[in-house]
Amino acid sequence: MSLFEAIRDKKEKLAVIGLGYVGMPLAVAFAKKTAVIGFDLNSEKIRKYKEGKDPTAEVGDRVISETTVDFTDDPSRLREAVFYIVAVPTPVNQDKTPDLSPVESASRLLGQNLTRGSIVVYESTVYPGVTEDVCVPILEKESGLKCGTDFKVGYSPERINPGDKLHRLENIKKVVSGMDEDTLEDIAGVYGLIIEAGVHRAGSIKVAEAAKVVENSQRDINIAFINELAMAFDRMGIDTKEVIDAMDTKWNALGFKPGLVGGHCIGVDPYYFIYEAEKLGYHSRLITAGRQINDDMPAFVGENIIKQLVLSGKSVKNSRVVFFGVTFKENCPDVRNSKIIDIVRYLEAYGINPVLSDKWADRTEFYANYGYELTDEGAVRDADCIVISVAHKEYRERGLKEWAAFFGQSPNSERVIIDIKSVLEKDEILAQGYLYWRL
């Protein structure tokens, strides 16, 4: 009996290591087909899952309460499994170099509990070579086992899009790879249990690792192109959204829009490619330029907030600027690598202490990550400027009259609306005498 067949027939267990926005949906999906151990070092997170609460909002409380995933923060429980999926985050350091410490720590912990005859699959985003050159030696050292003889490895890049209810885990084709043909077939079979869209067998682990960083670098470059246009059109007095609306009437327009590029993938993965390419003596000009443009966008937005406050006749220092939305994308509680914070820090240099509000975000997590408190919408009043920074559905459904309530009694000519995601109707706002700027 192959390892895949043992997993399929529930004779052996599968373990998911790291239960965040990627690992938790994976564990829940696999639990519908086989026996699953869901492991995370965060005891508070495990407690919430056991109570049937989904802090990620990816699958919902009801699904969590009904799942058969065996949630645990006890590393020794990993010894019960023979198929391991590592889904821990891989961020970047302050100098934009890859921070492999989470995946290295996970490898050490797993190595200490690794079973003979098992398969380890990494889903964490890495540059080509990390699985075999960094992770395998750690697994071997900690376990005393030999890769290729006592255990096998593979790589399958995560493709989950947090907050996206259309493109779900099950209907996104899965790229899989293994260190040899037998391992590849076992990994393909196991993922095939849950991936309705099917799997793509990559030619090698390095190919699969490269595919992940490249697919997000491609998006980063396309967004950078539109962001550069937005900065140029702003100087020309041209509305970028109107240009894009016109361009998008052609069949081959790509549909990208300007914006802040944060989160755990697009704003991070290109740096992994840049790092590895430069280690080998190649300077990535296009990807590096795209990253620079997108990293400059918070300052560009901040400049325009200051400009609009000046035009309103308000003193910039101590102006009351309120941000609606702090997550890295709409309809999602994920605050990782939120670029809203970069705008906030830009404004603080001008003596502004912005107010931040977002009911999607977890207050405790947000404060722990950035050191800023979130304010209830009900407490927001007398704003000089409101910034619609994330296109949550609640904000899209809100009319100008509802937004106006946050300004208090000031005349319309002194009210500034900054619409980063083009949520509102420009003509209606300008007709009412507001100062309005959108990206």
Image (cartoon, helix red, strand yellow):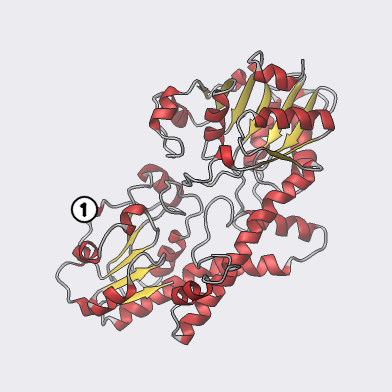
329 over 80 or under it: above or below: below
The residue to which callout 1 is attached is 378
Question: Outermost residue toward the bottom?
Answer: 236
Residue 271: name its quadrant: bottom right
Q: Position of residue 87 (x, y in %)?
A: 61, 37
Which amino acid, mark 1? Gly
**Residue 40 in sight here:** no
Question: Depth check: 34 or 260 in front?
Answer: 34
Question: Depth check: 52 or 175 in front?
Answer: 175
Locate the N terminus and report the quarter of the image it occupies.
top right
Secondary structure beneath dot 1 equals: helix
Q: Position of residue 38 (x, y in %)?
A: 55, 26
Locate the C terminus and report the quarter of the image it occupies.
bottom left
**Residue 196 in sight here:** yes
Residue 333 falls left or right of residue 102: left
230 over 400 or under it: above or below: below
Residue 358 falls left or right of residue 38: left
